[in-house]
Amino acid sequence: MLRNILLKSSGNHLKFSGRYLKSSALLGSYRSKVSYYSTKIQTKLTSENYPNVHRDSRFKKLTSDDLNYFRSILSEQEVLQSSELEDLSFYNEDWMRKYKGQSKLVLRPKTVEKVSLILNYCNDEKIAVVPQGGNTGLVGGSVPIFDELILSLANLNKIRNFDPVSGILKCDAGVILENANNYVMEQNYMFPLDLGAKGSCHVGGVVATNAGGLRLLRYGSLHGSVLGLEVVMPNGQIVNSMHSMRKDNTGYDLKQLFIGSEGTIGIITGVSILTVPKPKAFNVAYLAVESFEGVQNVFVRARQELSEILSAFEFMDSKSQILAKSQLKDATFPLEEEHPFYILIETSGSNKDHDDSKLETFLESVMEEGIVTDGVVAQDETELQNLWKWREMIPEASQAEGGVYKYDVSLPLKDLYSLVEATNARLSEAGLTGDSPKPVVGAIGYGHVGDGNLHLNVAVREYNKDVEKTLEPFVYEFVSSKHGSVSAEHGLGFQKKNYIGYSKSPQEIKMIKDLKAHYDPNAILNPYKYV
Ligand SMILES: O=C(O)CC[C@@H](O)C(=O)O
Ligand SMILES: [Zn+2]
C-alpha cells in the first residue's frame, strides 16, 4: 500500500511522519449539517447595522389580504407566518450570523405552479421577494434585508429523472446537494460539484450562486456542467429550458444568465446537470511546505505529474489549522509538527494501483527535493474523510470566536498569499488585533489553489465597524490592483453590492442593470443586493 511504501522510504532518506488518524475523533461538522447556533453572539438587524440602506417605499407592506391570498393557494405546511422575528430566525439570519432580516412570512411551495402563482401575485402587488435555498451563502444574498417575503425552495425536493447512459440528472431546485450526490453515486455517477455545506445547500442554490467548491479544478464550473434549467420569472412565467444536450448552438445560451445571478432575475426551480462517472479510487495526501512559493511549486508539479487523476489541490496556512484544531478538539493533527503551509491533494481515478503508483512517485520526488517537508496519505475511507475535515472545518472554526469577515477572491497565484499578509499587517497597524478585548483574532488564508481562489477569513470576537472599515475597501482595492476578482465563487449578495465595480467595467454593470430592468421591471426579486 502507498503509505507503507512511503513509511519504508522514511527509514532511508525521506522524512514522512504521518500516522494513522483516530477516526472516532471527528464528529459532526459543517460538511454534514449547518451548525446554525454555533457562534457566541446575537445577530444584529441588518437595517440597524447598515443604516445607510433604506427600505424601498415602492414595495408594499404585507396586508391581511395578501396573507389570505397566499393561504388560499398554499396548504398550511407551506406557509410559515409569525409576528415574532425569533420564530423565523432560521430564514431571516444567514449562516455567519452577520445579517438579519425582518421577514414575517416564509412561503415553502411544493410545486412549480405555486411558485409561479406566488411570483405573479407579488409582481402585481409589488411585494419584494427573497428566494432562498439552503441558506448557506456567505455574502448575505439569501436573507432579507427588511421585510421581504422569503420564498424557500425547500419543499421542491424531488429527483425528476436520471439517465444512466448519459449521466444526466434532472431534479427540483430544493434537492439537498448531498442527497443528489448520494442518488447518482448509487448509479455509479457523481455530482460534479462538492462543497463543505453539501449537507444543507440546495442544488438550485448552488446553481443560482454558481458555487465553485472543491473539485472545480477537475470538473470545471457549473457554467459547463449545467445543461438546462427551469426558471420562474418575476411575472410568474415558467421558462422550461430543462435541456439535456451537451451541444446546442442555437443562439444565446440563456441558462447562463441565471447561473450565478443570485436570484435577481428569476427563481430556478429545476436543474438538468451532467454528472461524472464515479471514481473507483480516491487518495488524499496532506502535506507540509515551508513557504507559499513551495505551495506553488508543488501545484505545478502535481499538475504535471498527477495530471488527469488530480481532483483537488487545496492549501491551508498554519493559523487556519490552529483554528480548525480548536474545533476538532479530540482529533489528532495529521502531522507531528506545525508548518507554515499545508496542502491537501486529492486524486481520483478508475484504477487504484495506477493512482497509488503515480501519487507515490510524485510524493517521493517532491519530498526528495525538499519541496514537501512532511506528509501523510490516507489509508482508508475514514482517514480520507478525516484529512478532508482539516480543510472543511476551517469556515466553521473561523467564526467560532464570535464572527468572521470573509473575502473570497481570485488572484494571480503569485500574489495569492500576499493579501493575507497585507491584511494582517493592516489590522495590526490599526491596533485591532490581539487578545481579548481586541476585536480581531487574526486573518487566515486557505483555498482552492488550483483555481487561483483565496479564502481570506478574518476571525473576530464581534462584528465591528472599525474592523469592517479597515478591511473594506482595502481588500477590494488590493484585488483590483492585481486584476483579480472580488468574488471568485461566493457571489456578491449584500456584502459586496457596492464593490462590483472593482471587478466589472461600467459597461458591464450597465448591461447587468439593463437585463435586470428588462426581466424584473418592478425589481421585486432579491432587492438591496448587488444589482
Ligand atoms: O468560508 C469560506 O470563506 C469558504 C467557504 C467555502 O467556499 C470553502 O471553500 O470552504
Ligand atoms: Zn471555497
Image: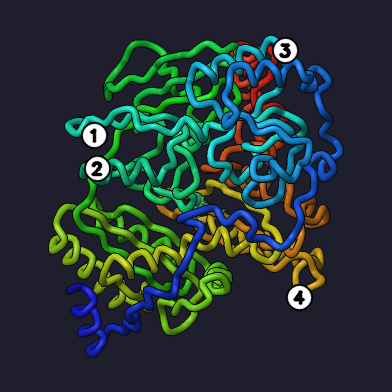
Using the numbered discs, state the Cα–Cα distance from disc 3 to disc 1 in whole angstroms: 42 Å
What residue did someone put label 4 on?
A: 435
What residue did someone put label 2 on?
A: 189
Q: Residue at x 24, y 76 (%)?
A: 3
Q: Amino acid at mark 3?
A: Glu
Residue neighbourhood size for the residue with mark 4, other residues' Cα within 10 Å, grouped as few (<14), some (14–19), many (≥20): few
3 or 4: mark nearer the eye: 3
Against 207, is 187 above or below? Answer: below
Q: Amino acid at mark 2?
A: Tyr
**Contact (CB < 8 A) between labels 3 and 2?**
no
Label 3 vs 2, first from the N-terminus:
3
3 or 2: mark nearer the eye: 3
Some atom of ligand 1 lies within 8 Å of the CB belonging to the residue at label 4: no
Checking the image for residue 125, the label placed there is 3
Using the numbered discs, state the Cα–Cα distance from disc 3 to disc 4 in whole angstroms: 52 Å
Q: Is residue 227 left or right of residue 427?
A: left
4 or 1: mark nearer the eye: 1
**Contact (CB < 8 A) between labels 1 and 2?**
yes
